[in-house]
Amino acid sequence: MEFTIDQIAQLLEGTVEGDGSQVIDTLKKIQEGTPGSIGFLSNLKYEKYLYTTKCSAIIVSEDFTPQKKITTTLIKVKDPYTAFSKLLENYAALTKPNPLGKEEPCYLGENSTIGEGFYRGAYSYIGKNCTIGENVKIYPQVYIGDGVTIGNNCVLHSGVKIYSQSKIGNDCEIHSGAIIGSDGFGFSPQADGTYKNVPQLGNVVLEDNVSIGANSTIDCATLGSTLIKKGAKLDNQVQIAHNVTIGENTVIASQAGVAGSTIIGKNCVLAGKSSIVGHIELADRTIVGGNTGIMKSVNEPGTTLFGFIGFDLKASLKSYSIFKKLPLLQDKLRELEKK
Amino acid sequence: MEFTIDQIAQLLEGTVEGDGSQVIDTLKKIQEGTPGSIGFLSNLKYEKYLYTTKCSAIIVSEDFTPQKKITTTLIKVKDPYTAFSKLLENYAALTKPNPLGKEEPCYLGENSTIGEGFYRGAYSYIGKNCTIGENVKIYPQVYIGDGVTIGNNCVLHSGVKIYSQSKIGNDCEIHSGAIIGSDGFGFSPQADGTYKNVPQLGNVVLEDNVSIGANSTIDCATLGSTLIKKGAKLDNQVQIAHNVTIGENTVIASQAGVAGSTIIGKNCVLAGKSSIVGHIELADRTIVGGNTGIMKSVNEPGTTLFGFIGFDLKASLKSYSIFKKLPLLQDKLRELEKK
Amino acid sequence: MEFTIDQIAQLLEGTVEGDGSQVIDTLKKIQEGTPGSIGFLSNLKYEKYLYTTKCSAIIVSEDFTPQKKITTTLIKVKDPYTAFSKLLENYAALTKPNPLGKEEPCYLGENSTIGEGFYRGAYSYIGKNCTIGENVKIYPQVYIGDGVTIGNNCVLHSGVKIYSQSKIGNDCEIHSGAIIGSDGFGFSPQADGTYKNVPQLGNVVLEDNVSIGANSTIDCATLGSTLIKKGAKLDNQVQIAHNVTIGENTVIASQAGVAGSTIIGKNCVLAGKSSIVGHIELADRTIVGGNTGIMKSVNEPGTTLFGFIGFDLKASLKSYSIFKKLPLLQDKLRELEKK
């Protein structure tokens, strides 16, 4: 990639402040800039780097005005992060690996079909009666069980395991080590203290545009489907139990967990290590803070919760700030008691 | 599967209320019922669906009496969940994949043996000097290190990794991506601030009827064995450190962790994301709540604990309810001080 | 291995108290000792076992004096844990599996090279343009993407997945199921509520002597590198997000997580299930307790933090001890109000 700053500004529909004729050949973080690179400034925590960056150009918000003298050229856009993402995409299309065809050996079971434009890596396995769409990349050591359906333009990274009967939509990306369709955790307690396995006969359905992070696990339903709706994005090491529904465009950060039969609305955010108990519902646009545990349904859309037992974010932060002062409160109370 | 409601009631030792002559050909959740399906009602949170379900039959408790008019036929049994499990089992036996034989290529090391009725999936690996019993299913891309022993009727799902010298009993099921016998986390701090690796020479022992969830990790002992006793059930993404013992019929939900050398009693329940510090003991029938951290031994059998630092469940919930009101408490205290 | 206690004491530069002529042929935990075995006593919680152990010899600290009569021989050393580790190492070198050579089939892409003394297990995969040093063990079903660099004396256990362009130093050990270089979790929110994938073009760099536990995940940087510095030790199921830096000799216990762009200093300790928010810095020698959440930068080296929202350990434990008594505090306050 080699373009002038002016050309890049045109691509991003931005305006140039400074010398737009310089040539850019790589992308860098603002604090790691080198001459010939372009960076961006979105989170203002990083503004200090703007005044010393060696990037030849920095993408900033159209609202932004530097507080000190700068030597870099600015490209002003509506949303710097989105604009930089667009640049990354263009760069990625030119530089990311794009394997195609078949490496030997790889396994294809009876009555299974795969569309044009595929990649089937070495030691990958496709079971019987599978239907796989076009432009699907199946990296080495992927396992796809019997009767699985996969749409177009999906990427299954190395070591993904998909149990039988799972259904995966179009444009899904599943990262290494993710497990789709493992048995739900269902055991029936017996009189003698032992547990009996409850067969899990349902499946997992991922709709279109779903992304699943590395080493995440999504259990199949006991009956029916565990459902990840379109546009949902799951980070690494996320756990989704049997019969859960994750709503459209809901984002779940790493190490979060959702227990059985819970229904999460659309456009929700579950932050890292949050956990949602089973058999409840979260309304659309619920935001669950980091480490937060949710123990009952959230009915009001757009609620933000935080805490060991999550409740309203502001109230929770207030309680936690007093928690730090509990020894002082206790002392004051004792003094009052003496009087 | 196609049976009448009467035939199913006979199998479940239940009694029919309504038309027992209808034919059932599938199993459904009560809220997703279709004509010709049978469902169940165990958790009364779902009772509302009974009055609108399209299932032709619903299994309920013998104590249960509908509060409104129903159109479905009831089968009354002692324990609806166990009864439905029994149905699921019968259905599963008829419909679940049951692979047998050997897919090529698959690897078998010197001096290793496997009993009758096996499945060895493509790209599975069995090291040297292994002894594997009868009716064992080894799915594609499973790895079994040297000197491993496995009993009868075990299922190792795709991508399971078992380090050398592990011992696995009869009737165990290990889900995809679980790691058995990885090195314990042992490093000896040196004077210069670096750490030196402490070799982990022990192994992991799973007794009979143990179930391990997807992407769980069980480390080998430094010396001796990390021990998962018979009937223990571990969910997905559970972490068991070196030299831990998990008692008989203990159930550990997803994302829970047990640190090194801790001994968990029998018939305990560790809920999701709970964590148990190292070098302690939990008495039999201890119940640890979700997200709860246990920092010292629990000596009284049957104790239930909850909280960031777990203590008695009821007391803990009481403290958390006051925690929410801390701003109010602080205000009251300030008012009193003024007076 | 068969040595006398005197010979072992000489190896460990320790002094013998008791009969040094006995022969030792195995290593055991103090509480599981058998005649002919040697154990150690470091954590004094285990002192009680010293007086009943069947080990023929026990390694203790040179400061240690038994409180009761003992029948075992003592070897007194500066640091019993380090001394025992040294013994374990010697024992391990004689007994641990040491596979060499190539098992078929295994995959080697164009323009990739591997040094002398390698092990390439069956169904392992090395992509194009990789450079791999000497004495590297690549266990079965490992995946190494294109353009990966690996130093000397590394061990990649079965099922490790390394995305393209990762760089791994010398003397690293990566346990089964660990994922190195999966995409950072970057999505740009769109006006219609959907998210657009932000390409992740950076890589992961592991410096020398790094250890990564089973099923841990380390995401590649958006740009630049996610960096794990030399001597860092990560346990199982640890999550490291994009653009994080982990300092030299920092130890991270299982199920801990570090969010994007955070910089952890050197010689830090992150205990089990701790979590560090994104875009902050932790000073050198910071100690983060179990389950603890860190939400802002820690500037003072050597700080120890604990709690749901972590703060000074002692103060936090004090607050948690009062938390347990909140019902009592509330009652007292009510009484005072009445007066």
Image (cartoon, coloured by chain):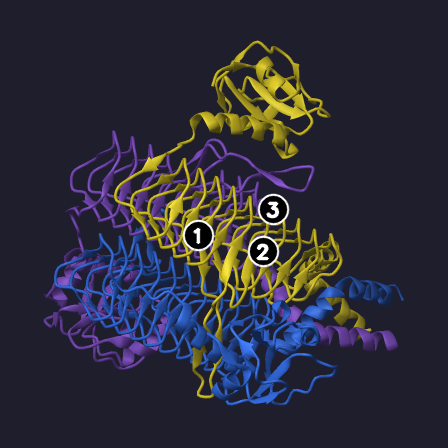
Chain colours: A yellow, B blue, C purple
Q: Residues within 10 Å of mark 2 (few under 14, many from 20)?
A: some
Q: Which mark is residue A178?
A: 1
Chain to which mark 1 belongs: A
* Picture layout, residue C43 above or below residue A270: below
Chain to which mark 3 belongs: C
Relative to the observer, which residue lies in front, C246 or A151?
A: A151
* Picture layout, residue C228 above or below residue A9: below
| Of labels 3 and 1, the one closer to you | 1
Relative to the observer, which residue lies in front, A105 or C191?
A: A105
Q: Which mark is residue C312?
A: 2
| Of labels 2 and 3, the one closer to you | 3
Q: Which residue does the image show at 61% across and 74% down from the upper left?
A: B55
Give the CA distance from mark 1 to mark 2: 37 Å
On the question of residue C60 being in view, the answer is no
* Picture layout, residue B78 above or below residue A172: below
Quadrant where the N terminus of chain C sits is: bottom left
The kind of residue tagged 2 is Asp
Q: Which residue is mark 3?
A: C296
Relative to the observer, which residue lies in front, C339 or A324?
A: A324
Q: Quadrant for residue B202, please give it.
A: bottom left
Q: What is the secondary structure assignment of the residue under circle 3?
A: loop
Q: Which residue does the image show at 69% across and 79% down from the upper left?
A: B71
Image spot of residue B74 (x, y percent): 62, 83
Q: Residues within 10 Å of mark 3 (few under 14, many from 20)?
A: some
